[in-house]
Amino acid sequence: MTKSKADEEDYWNSSKFKAFTFDDEDDELIRLKESRQAVNSIRRLVEEDDDEDDVEKVSWSGEPVGSISWSVKETAASNQRTDREPAFPKIPTDTPSLSKSQSGYSLSSLFKGETGGRGNFQSFTDTLSDSSIRLYAPELRKPKSEYKDYVSDWSPEETIQRLQQGKTAPLEKFRSLQDKLLLLDFAVSAHDGNVITAVLIYLKRTLSKEVLFRELESRQTALRHFIHYLTETKDQRLLLELLRFAHTCLPVTPVYLLPFSAEDSAHVQDHYTLLERQIIIEATDQQAERGGKVEIFQKFPRRASILNMPLITTLYYCCFYHYSEPEGTYSSPLNIRQTFKISGKQYFVTALAARAKLKAWLDVDALFTSRNWLGFTRKKSPLSFQRVVDVLQKNSAPTQVLQDYVGLVEDPDMRISLAQKHKCHDIVINTYRDMKDRQQLLGYRGKVGRGSAEERKIDELLNNQQIRWKN
Amino acid sequence: MAAHLSYGRVNLNILREAARKELREFLDKCAGSKAIVWDEYLTGPFGLIAQYSLLKEHEVEKMFTLKSGRLPSADVKNIIFFVRPRLELMDIIAENVFSEDKHHSSRDFHILFVPRRSMLCEQRLKEQGVLGSFINIDEYILDLIPYDGDLLSMEYESAFRECYLENDQTSLYHTAKGLMTLQALYGTIPQIYGKGDCARHVANMMLRMKREFAGTQNQILPVFDTLLLLDRNVDLLTPLATQLTYEGLIDEIYGINNGYVKLPPEKFAQKKQGEASKDLPTEPKKLQLNSAEELYAEIRDKNFNAVGAALSKKAKIISAAFEERHNAKTVGEIKQFVSQLPHMQAARSSLANHTSIAELIKDITTSEAFFDNLTVEQEFMTGVDTDKVNTYIEDCIAQKDPLIKILRLVCMQSVCNNGLKQKVLDYYKREILQTYGYEHILTLNNLEKGGLLKPQTSSRNNYPTIRKTLKLWMEDANEQNPNDISYVYSGYAPLSIRLTQVLARPGWRSIEEVLKMLPGPHFEERQQLPSGLHKKRQQGENRTTLVFFLGGVTYAEIAALRFLSQMEDSGMEYIIATTKLVNGTTWIKSLMDRPESQTP
C-alpha cells in the first residue's frame, strides 16, 4: 500500500484493457489447427475400428443410449410404428452391486425412521464409501410430532408440521377465527408456499370475504400468496374485489398490487396511443393496398400487419410508406416523432434505414444536409459516419453512394479500412496522399485493376515532385 | 456411469444412491407392469439420477411424454405420471384420464409429484373430477441433485424470481430441507456462515428443523467443516458479466442444460474415407459434459485463451500413443497396444469433439461484436463512465440487438454505479420500450424489484470502495497460468468468490465495512457436535467448505472456486451447491415477463 492515492485512482480507473487479449490470436489459431490436424490424421489411422463397443454408445442426438430422455423418444417412436415389444438396448447398470442389493436406505426412510438397522447400513457403506466414513442412524430419524401419529388432536403448529411432511391433517376442526389465524401464521413462518396455499384455500372456503381480506391486510406474505393463488386459478372476480378492497382500505398495498408507478403510467398511456394509431393506419393502408391505386403498396406489398408492433417498428413503417406526408396526419413520421418524443438519434437511424431500403438516395442525402451561417451546405450526422456506412451497406447501397459517407469518417485509419472494404479506391488513394505515405500507396497499386483510372492516378501521385513523402 | 461423482473430496454418489433407492421404492409400490408418462422438463434432472435400465428393472415397459388428448395404448397395469406440481399439467392429466376410462378400465393411475406434492394441484384434480382415479399420489423429493463430483444443483429455475420478486420463500424451505438431508448423510456441519436475507432465512429454518428432530443425534463424522450460504443478490454483478472460461463460454453461447449441450452439427459430421460427404446431419449434436471425461475435466475451467494450447498438447500425446503401434513387435506388445485401444479411441473422440467446440467458440470470441461488448463490460466493471448514457448500448438498441443483451448491459451499468441517475435510467427505459415494445415495462419493473436496475438514491456510489477493498479488478490477470481467480473473467474477480476467499483467510472481520455495504445481514452460527465426533485434523489436512449459492451460480464462479481448491496453500476444498446453474441470459430470462413474446 505504498501507492499514493492519485496513483491508485489512476490504477483503478485506467481504461486501457488488455484483458481477454487477442494478442496471441494467431498463435492460438495455429494451436487449434494443430489439434485439428492431429484429430484428422488419427481418424484415418483408426478408421477401420472406429466406434467400437467399448466406447459409450451415443445416439446421433447425443443422449447416451439408455438415458431417460433417449428412452422416452425411443418407446414413443416404436409405439407409433407397431405394438410389438420394443427392443431395449441392454446396457449394464452403473453400479451393479448396488442396484441388486436391497440394502441401503432412501431419503424418505431417513425421515421416517424406517431404516433397517445397522446391518443394512454396513453393507451399504461397504459397497460405496471408504471405511473412514462411518454411517450410523441419522439425526433426522423421528420428529417429535410423529409420536402422536394415531391421535388426531393436533395443535395448529403440529398440523402445519404434518402438512409440511406431506401427511394428511384435517383443517376442518379449526373452527374459531383465532385458530384459523394461528394456522395461517404458523404456515407463513414455515415458509412453505404449498402449506400456506392449503391453509388459504381452507380460509377462503370458511371465512367471509370481508373478514378474510381484513385479516390479510396485516399479513403481507399471506396476502401475496393469496393473490398468486387467485391469479393462478383465474379467479378474476375475487381478485378484483380484493384489489378494490385493497385500494380503499390498504394504503400500502396498491403500490404492490398495481404494478405501475407514476412515471411508468406515462409509458402505459403511450402504449395506448400507439395502439390507437396503429388501428387507424392499418385500416387506411389495407384499403389503399386493396384499391391498387397507390404505387408504393404495389411495388412493395406489405408483409405483415402493423398492429401490436413496437413503436420504432411503426416509425420505420411510416418512414417507408408515408415519408413525405404533412405533419398533421397520424401516419406522418414527423408527427410520430413529436407525439412519442423519439430521440433524435433513433429517428435518424430509423429514417436512414427505411429510405436506404427504398434506395431513395436523395432522401438519405437530405437527412444529413444542414446549412451553416455562410449558406454552405455540409453533411452533419448525430450518428458516427462509420455507423452510417454500416446502415447503408446493410441495405446494399452501391459504391457511389457509400463513398460519399466513407469519405466523411474522421479517423483516417478507420476511413481507410472502410474504404478498402467497400472498394472506394479514390478515398484510399487520397487518404494515403494526405498522410504522405508513399509505401502504402505503392502497396495499394497492386490491388487496383491494371491499366485502370485508379492505377493512373496513383502513378501520377508517385511521380509528383511537389509531394514531400514521409517514407 | 456415475463414478465421477465419487472421485471428489466428498463422495456425492452416496446422495445419488439414496435418491435412486427412493425411486425404486416408489416404483415397487405400484405392483405390476408400468408405463411412465413424463413431464418432459423432468427427464433432464432425472437423467442425472437414473438411467432407463433402472426403471426397466422395476417393470417400466413404456415411457411417454405428457401430451393432451388420449394416452397412447400400452398393455400395462399401471400408468404413472411423473410431473412438476403445475396447474396446467393437471389439466392435461385430467384429459388423459378422462379419455382413458372409456377404453380400458383396468389400468391403475398414479402420480408422482417432483419435488413436492401440492394441495393446489390436488384441488385442481378434484375440481376436474379425476382425483378419485388415482391409487397413489406421492412426492419425490429431488432437492439436491448431484451434478458433478463437487457440484450439487436443485435445478430450481425460478428460485431467484420467487424470492426477490414474488416474496415466496418456498424455494428456501426446499433448500433447508435439502441441507438437512445432506447433513443426515454427511454429518452435521459445525459452522454456518451466511450473507444476505435469504441466507439468514435458510439458516434459521435449518436450526429450527434440527430442534424439531430432537432426541436423536447424528453420529456421522462430519465431512463438511463449514457451510457458507450466499444470496445471489449480494453479488448481482457477476452473472451479468460474460464468462470467459471454456465451460462458461459454452454455456453463454449454446446453453448447458442438465449437463448436456446442443451444438450445430456441421463441425461434427464424420466423413468416412471414400464416401462422398453426402447429406449432412441437420439435427443438433448433443453432448454430455462432466468430469467423467478426462480431457473436459482438464480444460473446462481454463480461460478460453488457454484452451488452444491445452488441446494441441493433448493432440501430441494422443498422436504419439497411436504411433506406438509401429514399435509393437512382439505378440505381448501388440496385445498390450490393443488392450489400450479403447481408451485411446475415447481420448481421440473426446479431443475431436472439443477441438470442434473450441473452433465454434473461437469464431465468436474473435468477432468484432464480441470484443466491443466485452470492452464495454470491462469499462463498467472498472468504473469508467458508468454515470452517463453509453453510446454502445444506444447503438445496440438502434440496431435492435437481442433485448436480453441490452438488459444485461444496462443492469451491469446500474449495478456498477450503485443505481443510475434518474435521467439516465429514464432514457434507457424509454429507448427500450419504444424499440422492443411497451409490454416490456413489466420486465423492467421486475428488474427494478430485483435490484438489478434502480435509480440512484444517495449521491454516494459505493461500488468503487467495494471494488478496491475486495480487489475485484486485477490489471494483470494471467490467462495462461493464473495466480488469481480474476482469470475467469480476464480481469474481474467475482465478488461472491472473493467473499468466500476472504472468509477462509483472513476472515470476514477484515472486511466489515464492505459487508455492511452489501445487502442483507452477515452472520455466523455453530451447531453442536456430539462429543467424539470432533475431527482430529492431521497436519496439513485441508478443510472442506460447502458454498451454497441461493438464486444461482455461474460456471465461471465454479471455476474460480475449483481454482482456490487446487491452490497449494489455500488449505480449503470447496464443494458447490446452488438452486440453479445460471448465466446472464438465463438469469435475466427468468426475471422477464412473457420472454417468449420478444420480438426477434
Image (cartoon, coloured by chain):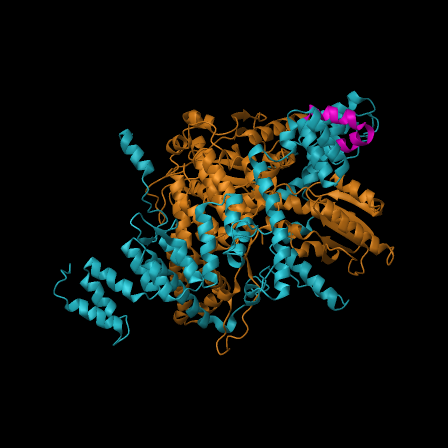
- Closest to the observer, B558 or B505: B558
Q: Is residue B75 magenta?
A: no
Residue A424's place in the image compared with B526, above or below, is below
Range shown magenta: A199-219
Q: Is residue A217 left or right of residue A333?
A: right
Residue B9's place in the image compared with B222, above or below, is below
Quarter of the image holding residue B461? top left
> From this viewpoint, is residue B572 visible?
no
Residue B243 picture location, percent across and down: 45, 47
* Residue at position x 78%, y 20% in the image: A178
* Residue at position x 41%, y 72% in the image: B329
**Residue at the outermost bottom position:** B274
Quarter of the image holding residue B286? bottom right
Q: Colour of chain B?
A: orange
Residue B195 picture location, percent across and down: 51, 30
**Residue at the outermost top position:** A178
> From this viewpoint, is residue B429 visible?
yes
